[in-house]
Amino acid sequence: MHRPWGRTIPRRVSPEALVHRGGRPSRPALLAAGAALLLTAAVAPALTGPGTASTAATTASSGAADVPVGSGSYTDTLPAGASGPSALNGAPASPKVTDDYEGAAPTNEWWSSLIFQRYPENPHGENLFAHPASYHPHEGGLEMGYPQTPALVADGLKYEHPHAADLSLGAVGLDSPDTRVADSGDWTVTAEWAGGGPTLRVTIGQGLPFAYAETSGGDAEVSFESAPDVWHEDGSVVGASVGDRHYALFAPTGSPWTRSGDTFTAATGDDGHYSVAVLPSPEDLDAFAPYAHSFVTDSLVEYDYDEAASTLTSTYRVETEPVEGDRTGTLMALYPHQWNNAVTDVTGQSYASPRGEMRVTEGGSFTTELTTNGVLPSLPTVDGADHDRMRQLIDEVLAEEELFPEPGDTYWDGKAMGRLAQLVPVADSIGHTEARDELLGLVKGRLEDWLTAGGTRQFHYNAEWGTMLGYPDSFGAAQELNDHDFHYGYFVSAAAVVARYDRAWAAEDAWGGMIRLLIRDVAATDPDDPMFPRLRSFSPYAGHGWASGHAGFAAGNNQESSSEGMHFAAATALFGSLTGDEEIRDLGVYLHTTQASAIPRYWQDQGGGTFPEDYEHDVVGMVWGDGGDYRIWWDGGDEEHYGINYLPITAGSLYLGHDPEHAGAVYQSLVDRLGREPEIWRDIHWAHRALSDGDDALRMFEEQWQTYEPEAGGSKPHTYQWVSTLAEVGTVDASVTADTAHYAVFDDGGTRTHTAFNPGTDPVTVTFSDGVELRVEPGSLASTRGEGGGGDPGDPGDPGDPGDPGEPGDGNVGDGDLHLTPSALSGTPHGSADEITVASAGGRNQDGLPPEDRVVLRVDGLTGSHTGDATAFSLPVDSGNAIANAVQVRVVYDLDGDGADDRTETYRYFATNDQSGWEEYTQGGGVADSDGALGDMVDGSVRVELWSALGSHSSQILVGPDEGASITIPFTD
């Protein structure tokens, strides 16, 4: 049985984590963060950005309007009986913002309880974990603390750095009825207290040691929770400690602090300001003081993806404004995933945090550089797999009675679509084109159903919150704005699979327009987007997303299934590439690469230093603002506590194996905890195991494949393809890069397999950093081992046991008939009519001289007896109306698969006419040159090379089931 698994639904953590507390403020208007790249707007009419109107009705109005977006549509009115963003009591919730707030309302932030009032009795917000400082808003302002010491709770299942107030920022006489958001940046927020005497605004942010306060109508006030140890008092600067936590208070020059008991006040006037900083130590006061009046007004991340260099460069920038003097810039504390990859110097100062040591840098920005290790759409299928069994397993999936189980909400229907979509390239890679096309039809149909307003499944745009809501929903995706990247990632992933085989379907003026809206809902990059907030489901500074829309927890926000966040990122990169949108592609690469640098550290303590030394668990099921918890949102087994951060398994999951030794240690940790091999979600764990030991994963599958029940988003044929491929190609080799966004390299005892995908419409040659070059046809996955699909069925027969290549007479070549496909030679024709482009000779004479851009097609693992006959071929060729064009072919045999050519045959070129239409190029023109001799073949290979010998125009070769290009090799079983 599959155990249901949940999300950030009503407060189901330990009671001690959910205690409500009172709180306090934030700072001047932060502009909505600037963007690095802009997403192309959907073709829907521009809608007015959400403001502060209270229109979040829980029932539909009578004037519902369907808004067309290409071939799809959404409704701008809540469907009948549905609920939108709501408080815990079911009442509609509106964004809690000031009158001058601009832009769509951000959610899923570390500070979201300020803007989304989930609990009617708390109009201020919950604990806010900015790191290194923590905060809590209340009617009199903003509590501030520095939770540097971890504690173990819930019988050691959770470690936490709980908020404890050391002081509170306020204004004399402040008693505000609520706390509202005045502005926000990528990792900063400005909160306002008004309507109760003075007005206070405070700006806080992740990594910021300072809290910046502005007052109006009342003097500055800082109240300590207990008597502080004052170790510096010099007019407008006070240094004080509470236990081993150290703070500095900075008032304007000429406005000295006055102490009364445990409260300090300063006469700041109507347009006053002050700041409070948490210091690493009292000795750091002089280093912090110069930045005390340089107020942060905005925060943004700018990223640049260099595809050729496989590098992602991210600059984290804050805008500052001097409210006194002319000093700009500030001090920022970097998380481990940042300072480990920073090209900006850090100081010797540091802080403790739930993510480990934070190191301080000085200035207005810092920059990190990360290697981009590629995102594949699928793995190649190896010859060693039983293709007949794989075909049978695919057919069994298609024969299931309920491919889309009811009620079919955005999450479970998404998983069902993803499950089928992942089988499309598997079926294609083994030549099961009938199943491939049936799967594509099922996925298309369900997507179109969702992407069309008015049916039982549809999307609604909520203008007040600036969000797309799918109905029916689950896990609070509509009422709490939870998990949009988790849910919508399945839609984007399925659409990317369809786009691989039907580009027209994914065009912006077709169904791709609605998919782009879902991408923008999750991760819009334009700060001026009229419909959506910037990067809703991704926290740039944290390096990962937050699942809860409202963050209404004493432990802050949380993220459980980090792997589903990565699934959205990989799908976005692929959809962008397949639709020719580099901005969407780069967004996906940024999200995927950044999270890959954070997830192993913070969920699995990779490298150490994140989990407390006395924490006895090797992984956490979910990360919280205040720490990490082994538990998950339901009472699951240990397999689910580990596996929730693996699924769904797709080729975008290879990041889990970038460090095979670490992946192996995590798997062994689970086995040791269980005292046995995994039984729940066993297919998820076999797939994870394959990233460190493919042979062991394949062993488990072979022993249990007929009896186990797949996880809801998985299937037996997909798992079999995954484990059989990794058993043959080995583990991920992240030391080798390539000049494309879509590649992977594997290593099996020193033998590398290079794989790349070409999402474009022209052939490309991918160059790997170890010098290997791989030609990849449009829409195809090419690999130096295995078959990737993209229309190519690949396998010329069942080669049998890869450990026993067989002998002549026990062959697999049949009658020697092979067919040309866009990326390889195959035992069966290409599934549909297609063309191979042969590049122009550029006016050069290349007779007998194959150039670097020649077409190379091959098939490996062939065994057969030599018949004594000669090679034959039939190649339909067309050069259009070009004059003096000629195509030439070479056939190369490697009889024993040792990499050395045993027989090379170069045929006389074929001069095409100047009339459009297919002409037949055969061996009848004769051999121009040959070298070596033929004999019996054992586990050998055949290679066909095509190029233009003459002319200045490219030529086409027809492939496909009807009179497509073929070659007959002189071998038989």
Image: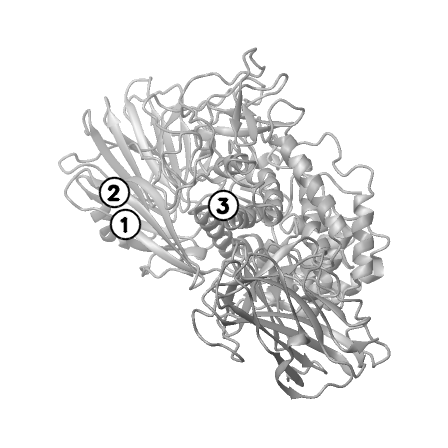
Query: Which amino acid is tagged 2?
Result: Thr
Q: Is residue 528 above or below residue 294?
A: above
Residue found at x 27% / y 24%: 172
Q: Distance between the residues labelled 3 and 1?
A: 28 Å
Which numbered disc covers residue 413?
none
Q: Position of residue 156 (x, y in %)?
A: 62, 48
Q: Identify the secondary structure beneath mark 3.
A: loop
Q: Along the line of sight, which residue is nearer the eye, 689 or 836? A: 836
Residue marked by disc 1 = 364
Q: How would you rate the neighbour count of disc 1 (Cα within 10 Å): few for under 14, some for 14-19, many for 20 or more?
A: some
Residue found at x 62% / y 20%: 82
Residue marked by disc 3 = 161
Query: Which amino acid is tagged 1?
Result: Gly
Query: Mark 3 or 1, which is nearer the eye?
Result: 1
Which comes before the other along the chain, label 3 or label 2?
Answer: 3
**Residue 947 falls in which quadrant of the image?**
bottom right
Q: How would you rate the neighbour count of disc 3 (Cα within 10 Å): few for under 14, some for 14-19, many for 20 or more?
A: many
Residue found at x 13% / y 36%: 254
Q: Where is residue 778 in the image (x, y as percent from the top left)?
A: 56, 57
Q: Where is residue 109 in the image (x, y as percent from the top left)?
A: 46, 37
Q: In this view, does 235 lie above or below 469?
A: below
Q: Identify the secondary structure beneath mark 1.
A: loop
Which numbered disc covers residue 320?
2
Q: Distance between the residues labelled 3 and 2?
A: 29 Å
Tag 2–tag 1 contact (CB < 8 Å): yes
Specify the quadrant that holds the N terminus.
top right
Label count reads: 3
Left or right: residue 162 versus residue 255 is right
Q: Along the line of sight, which residue is nearer the eye, 474 or 123? A: 474
Query: Which amino acid is tagged 3?
Result: His
